Amino acid sequence: MDRGLLVLVAILGLLWLSNGESVMKYGAVGDGIADDTSAFQKAWENACKGSSKTGSVHVPAGKVFLLNSLHFTGPCIPKPLLFTIDGEMIAQSDPNKWENGENGVIPWLIFDQVDGLAIVGRGLLNGQGKAWWDIHCRDHPGPNCIWLAPTMMTFSNCGNVTLKSLRFRDSAQTHVLVMGSQNVYISDIKITSPEASPNTDGIHITSSTSVSINHSDIAAGDDCVSIGDQVNNVTVSFVNCGPGHGVSVGSLGRGGTEVAVENIRVWHVNFTGTTNGARIKTWPGGTGYVRGIEFFDIRFSSVQNPIIIDQFYEKGSSHRESEIHEDEWNIGYKGGNEA
Ligand SMILES: *[C@@H]1O[C@H](CO)[C@@H](O)[C@H](O)[C@H]1NC(C)=O
Ligand SMILES: *[C@@H]1O[C@H](CO)[C@@H](O)[C@H](O)[C@H]1NC(C)=O
Ligand SMILES: *[C@@H]1O[C@H](CO)[C@@H](O)[C@H](O)[C@H]1NC(C)=O
Ligand SMILES: *[C@@H]1O[C@H](CO)[C@@H](O)[C@H](O)[C@H]1NC(C)=O
């Protein structure tokens, strides 16, 4: 082999290594038809173990990846682990092709026990949720209707997470779920789902501390941001909300649970065409406290109930019907299943 050829081989080798973290390396096809779930799973496992050169996962632009439920489990060696999404990821659209969830969550993309994670990029997550909405009990009651559908991106027991710039569309249920996590920074994201889609919260936070959401646009069928039991230190700032059900603290204390919610700041938020704006809703019978809640510089335009504080949530309202169903599937992570 002559010298020139050796140099060429070396350069090609380096190029290959520097792209080594791409999901394509793990056999992903990216044509929107082939199921790329196992390729993504392998890419994650390798990055998490610290085996890939860069300790990262890259989803390339210009491709569409069809994916079923993915469990991105830690702890991982690289801190932070970098997950760059430039392409489009679409969820399997047929509800019959999903497995049952646990703890009231059917995850599409779940990050579990990861400390140090940065998810960035200009890509799109498309939940293709319509088939799930079409069998949801709220609008389609019947023996085979469902209350529980996949959540798009879940952080469970994670710490030090950055989520930036991504676009989220048409989740089957909640778009971003933060539970049992600390230090989560969400910025510059865009969430879009139809106003009529059931339970499609933008971001739901529960049992977590220190979460910030800023410079984001959220249009959804349920709350733009909702805050559940046991949450401390949340800032929501520079957010456009609408359509949707507003920014809600609650519903809290469902079934008599212990509530500890404090230090919630909602600043510079525009509500446009929402059913509610600033809302606090608690169930009768819950115990604990809700304190240090601040809504500041909020603007309302075409909002039905700009400010609501409801301490008798779902009692005496039009929700009696759904309450009966709710009790049957009482595993949900979110207090009320709608409204
Ligand atoms: C996050 O980072 C801080 C500072 O580096 C560290 O002290 C903490 O243990 C990390 N993990 C969590 C879960 O916050
Ligand atoms: C509150 O949360 C922010 C992130 O939004 C974090 O930077 C700050 O350190 C937290 N404050 C306390 C007292 O934990
Ligand atoms: C918004 O979040 C980003 C990313 O965490 C941060 O750099 C920026 O300072 C935040 N801006 C405001 C106004 O809080
Ligand atoms: C909210 O609306 C005001 C007035 O139209 C605008 O100046 C401001 O930039 C908007 N806020 C956000 C977060 O876009």
Image (cartoon, helix red, strand yellow):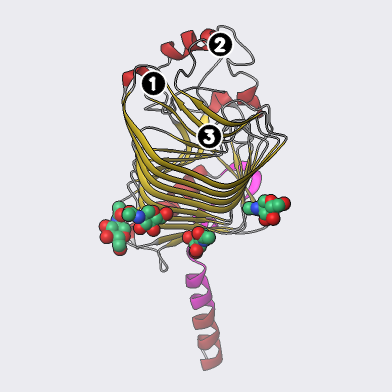
Q: Is residue 243 above or below residue 118?
A: above
Q: Is residue 331 visible?
A: yes
> Disc 1 and disc 2: Cα gap in Å?
26 Å
| Contact, mark 2 vs mark 3 (Cβ under 8 Å) | no
- Stretch in magenta: 12-35
> Disc 1 and disc 3: Cα gap in Å?
19 Å
| Contact, mark 1 vs mark 2 (Cβ under 8 Å) | no
Q: Earlier in the sequence, mark 2 or mark 3?
A: 2
Q: Is residue 221 left or right of residue 235?
A: right
* Residue that numbered label 3 is attached to: 174
* Residue that numbered label 2 is attached to: 144
Q: Which of label 1 and label 3 is nearer to you?
A: 1
Q: Secondary structure at mark 3?
A: loop
- Image spot of residue 294 (x, y percent): 47, 44
Q: Which mark is residue 132?
A: none
Q: Does 32 lie within the magenta span?
A: yes
Residue drawn at x 64%, y 28% as measured from the top left: 197
Q: The disc labelled 2 sits on which kind of residue?
A: Asn
